[in-house]
Image: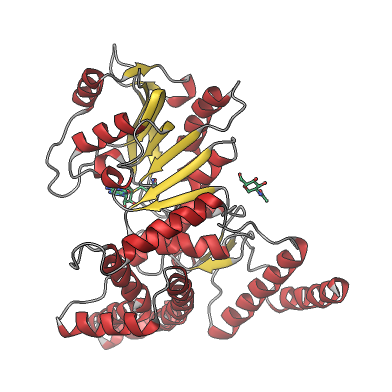
Amino acid sequence: MWTTIWTLTVTLWLLGHALCAGDSTPESLSYVGDAARLARSLQVVLIQQTILTVAENTTPPKPDTPRHMTEKEHLLQRMDKKNGRWTEHHPRHRLLEALRGFSAYAQTHLAELDHLKTLYSHVSKQQKALLEKEVGYSKKFTSISDLVAINQNLCHTIVQNALEFYRISQGELDRHTEEMMAAGRAAERVSVSQSLKHLVRDWAAEGANERDVAFSCIIKVLEGLVAGHDEPLTALLPGAGLGRLGQDVSKLGFDVTNNEWSMYQNVVYRFLETNGGRRHQNVVYPFLDSWSHHKTTSDMLRGVSFPDVAMNASAVVLVEGDFTTAFMGEAGHFDVVVTHFFIDTARNLMSYLDTIFRILKPGGHWINFGPLLYGSAPFVQLSLDEIVAVAEAMGFQFRDGPDECGAVSLAGMEVRSLEAVYGFDERALVKNAYDAQFWVAQKP
Ligand SMILES: C[S@@+](CC[C@H](N)C(=O)[O-])C[C@H]1O[C@@H](n2cnc3c(N)ncnc32)[C@H](O)[C@@H]1O
Ligand SMILES: *[C@@H]1O[C@H](CO)[C@@H](O)[C@H](O)[C@H]1NC(C)=O
């Protein structure tokens, strides 16, 4: 049976390649112009997927260990409408809002595109003639809306997967959507788009340049901690985004818990738990909603396949919710807390520090890597030297990290500095990078 499929797929594969020779690779699918060629390159993706499916003919691990089951039970209780007050802060409300956003992906993006078409209509007839002749400017609108439709399919699958996982009916989501529309509340566009870009940062080969600097440094420290332990150590990663670092940490033998508050991230993570077990199983077009900083239009319209490594959904448990409240009952529980691009997201930084200290075991380690980019209306905003002073006063003892974790940030302090990119699109004509601050601090 497999042999037949093999022969068939190999034949189709060759056919696919003959049709659009040399224009797509599984890592990054260059967009190829008109709709017919696009359809063919998508066909190639499907064929490649089939080949990978045959090649990786084992069932990927499922998130169904006892730890997963217990956490899911707790999650479903927290998500119950009757649990707590029903406001827009209720996790079920936040989930429904995220699902409304993903469901409306095409609608919100096409509305944006329509606006751009209107703007283009102000260009003079002569100018338009030149633009159309030389670059086929209007065709870009068509190409983008074709790809928006493909992204919408992905978003639709993300929504369906979430409805099943959280045991919510389409009817409930529809009623929520109607209520919100009646209240004049637009579906979220930016957070959906950001979460799709996080697929590149965390789960695409292209994201390696963003991941490598931080990951290799963090992994190096963790390898040192794990050496000589027979029992697995426990690691918690708050603000885990789409969870790649946690996945890599689990490979060192840690029992990993990811924690993430955003339902826009969490529904994509749940999708990966179901659909991320095979390499290059999915494609997203993450860059089509921003027209700035592109060297070529095909850069803007390129597809990115994910995951670049198969996700092992059974290796990591995701605990949804706010870091400062989700681990109330877990004082002295974790050997390691890794904050990766996280501490500056705090409403109250002091509560983050208190929580990290409280949930660590005596002798446990806090590893930090990230900028100090304070968000909207934080209660307190500290500079690096102040964070170190406050953490030391709480009892944390700073330990010097390995040399590959950068140069010392401040004389006399065990904190290092490393340039870290956070921009999603490595081909863009703009760079967004931080002098990320790295430290290891131990609870006595
Ligand atoms: C700057 S992002 C970094 C995500 C990921 N670590 C990465 O580097 O790609 C910060 C993340 O922290 C999450 N976050 C913010 N406040 C949180 C809280 N109180 N508890 C848990 N997660 C939170 C955000 O939703 C966001 O996904
Ligand atoms: C997935 O992770 C679990 C727990 O760490 C491990 O026992 C299992 O071997 C892993 N499976 C694969 C296919 O990597």
Residue 2: tell me if it is visible.
yes
Q: In this view, does 299 lie to the left or right of 52?
A: left
- Reply above or below: 55 against 345: below
**Quarter of the picture holding the C terminus:** top left
402 or 89: nearer the viewer: 89
Res. 305 image quadrant: bottom right
165 or 136: nearer the viewer: 165
- Reply above or below: 112 against 276: below
- Reply above or below: 13 against 211: below
Task: Please give the count of numbered marks on the rendered protein.
Answer: 0
- Reply above or below: 342 against 154: above
Name the outermost residue toward the top: 412
Q: Where is residue 72 in the image (x, y as percent from the top left)?
A: 45, 58
**Residue drawn at the location 19% of the way across and 34% of the way down:** 350
Q: Position of residue 169 (x, y in %)?
A: 39, 80
**Quarter of the picture holding the N terminus:** bottom right
268 or 9: nearer the viewer: 268
Name the outermost residue toward the bottom: 125
**Residue drawn at the location 44% of the way across and 54% of the way down:** 71
Q: Where is residue 415 in the image (x, y as percent from the top left)?
A: 34, 21
Colour scheme of the picture: secondary structure
Q: Where is residue 358 in the image (x, y as percent from the top left)?
A: 30, 31
Res. 197 image quadrant: bottom left
19 or 393: nearer the viewer: 393
**Residue drawn at the location 54% of the way across and 71% of the way down:** 31
